Image (spheres, rainbow, N blue to C red):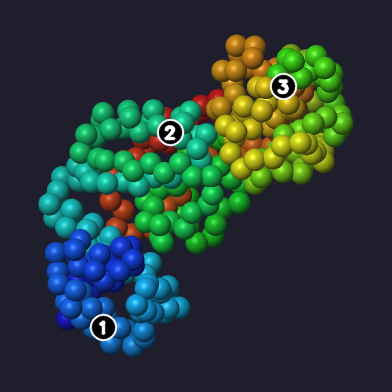
Amino acid sequence: MDRLMAMQVFVTVVDGGSLSAAAEQLDLSRPVVSRYVAELEDWVGARLLHRTTRRLSLTPAGNELLPRCRQMLEFSDDMRHALDTPDETPRGLLRITTSTSFAQTQLIQAVVDYGRRYPGVAVDLLALDRTVNLVEERIDLAIRMTNRLEPNLIARPLGVCRSIICAAPDYLAHHGIPRKVEELALHNCLTHSYVGRSLWQFDPKKATGKGGKTRSPAKSQSVAVGGSISANEVTVLLQAVLAGVGIGHMPAYAVAPLVASGRLVQLLPDFEPLQLGMYGVYASRKHMPATLRTMLDFLAQRFAGQPF
């Protein structure tokens, strides 16, 4: 049995949802596809698919084996590319995911500029406001803003994500301007579903006084907040903040131009919300293709020191 081909058939069956779809995609007969799946099941000693007249579904063993088959197929592709391109010129497909707001405001232009430098690379950019399983969803690189990294993944620091507490002038005209952190509890604070939904924290090291000098002593502060709108995506919340609905806790990369233009007003400028690390996250150091390595180098150089 060609085990690598059997894995390819198994993955294609799962992705296509049927033996017939896999047979058409791979240009094989349906009986050949069925035989490959059966031989793979014999080799691993477990049933991988539940077969009914209407649909296919993975067994627990199939769920366990599927990401490993994808990984083996990717390793095989890496080996072929390594032989085809001994000069390590980046080429091929690179799948990247990040939040919708960062993709729109920062990453898409970085991808365009990277593509001009390495025209042999195609990028599949997935703007998703959820944490993805890199192996199962075949993601090469995830750009994440977090202070809690998953221990089973590898993360390269790319920069720092800063935030701004801000509101529209219309909201402040009707509700007043909070002068202290604790006064935020009295306002309509629009919150992100996953970041600081009920508690906004401020970094004591970033509290400053007149002349830019650090206050001493500077104490950590946090405030319980709530409001009329919560959402899982920054650009959605930003539209509500711009409409004068409430106060937002927004990433600087998304709102700094709006503050500079006067459409939003920065609040509590002496106190900076807790910073998040910006990381390039990937699954393994082994068999790292030139596309991933050069993209990480490119993003690290581009975003390091940026006033995010």
Residue nearest the observer in this picture, 232 or 34: 34
Quarter of the image with the C terminus is top right
Separation of disc 1 and disc 3 at Cα?
Answer: 61 Å
Answer yes or no: is residue 202 visible: no
Q: Position of residue 149 (x, y in %)?
A: 56, 53
Q: Quadrant of residue 108?
A: top left
Residue for point 34% across, 88% down: 45
Q: Where is residue 151 in the image (x, y as percent from the top left)?
A: 54, 60
Q: Of the two numbered discs 1 and 2 on the same chain, state the one appearing first in sequence.
A: 1
Name the amino acid type tagged 2. Answer: Leu
Residue for point 17% across, 81% down: 1
Mark 2, mark 3: which one is toward the viewer?
3
Helix, strand, or loop for circle 3? Answer: loop
Q: Is residue 303 above or below residue 32?
A: above
Residue for point 75% across, 27% down: 246
Q: Mark number for residue 244?
A: 3
Q: Residue furthest front?
A: 53
Separation of disc 2 and disc 3 at Cα?
Answer: 28 Å
Q: Is residue 300 above or below residue 268?
A: below
User: Disc 2 designates what residue?
Assistant: 107
User: Disc 1 designates what residue?
Assistant: 38
- Disc 2: CA contacts within 10 A as few (<14), some (14-19) or many (>=20): many
